[in-house]
Image (tube, rainbow, N blue to C red):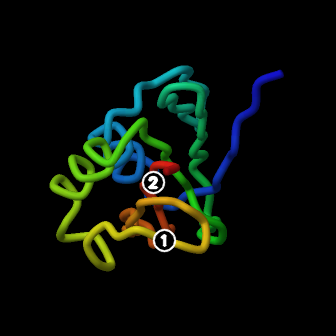
Amino acid sequence: MDGIVFFRTRQHDEVVDFYRELGATVWREQPDCTILQAGDFRVGFCAREAADTEGIVTFVFEDRAGVDAAYDDLADRADEPPRFNERYGIYQFFATDPEGRTVEFQTFE
């Protein structure tokens, strides 16, 4: 079984560009929605008059090097540098997309 998480967006093009710059590719274009894919993860953004900004979009990397590379690209949007989260056994950081959604970058350790 596969799945897609969809979000309403008021800033379709800016949001899609943000995730494409992270390495996601367009999986499918629909009349007012773009579905992006990053590995096995798919997320769709649909142009609407209101935006869904709750929840966390999380990208999982193979190792710390992947998380660190993402941080290098997003340091200006990141809350703080990557760190080890002992409680969950992950190395992670959080950033914000153009519309205010929380985006997490992590690897399990």
Q: Nearer the viewer, residue 105 or 99?
A: 105
Residue visible at 53% across and 21% down in the picture: 27
Q: Report the mark closest to the observer, 2 or 1.
A: 1
Task: Give the label on residue 85, or none.
Answer: 1
User: Mark 2 highlights which residue?
Assistant: 106
Q: Secondary structure at mark 2?
A: strand
Task: Give the label on residue 22, or none.
Answer: none
Q: Nearer the viewer, residue 50 or 96?
A: 96
Q: Nearer the viewer, residue 91 or 41?
A: 91
Q: Amino acid at mark 2?
A: Gln
The outermost residue toward the bottom is 79
Residue 43 in the figure: left or right of residue 74:
right
Residue visible at 32% across and 50% down in the picture: 67
Q: Quadrant of residue 24?
A: top left
Measured along the vertical axis of the image, is residue 42 above or below residue 16? Answer: above
In the rendered image, which quarter contains the N terminus? top right
Question: Percent x, y for residue 44?
Answer: 60, 40
Residue 77 in the figure: left or right of residue 40:
left
Q: Nearer the viewer, residue 7 or 77?
A: 77
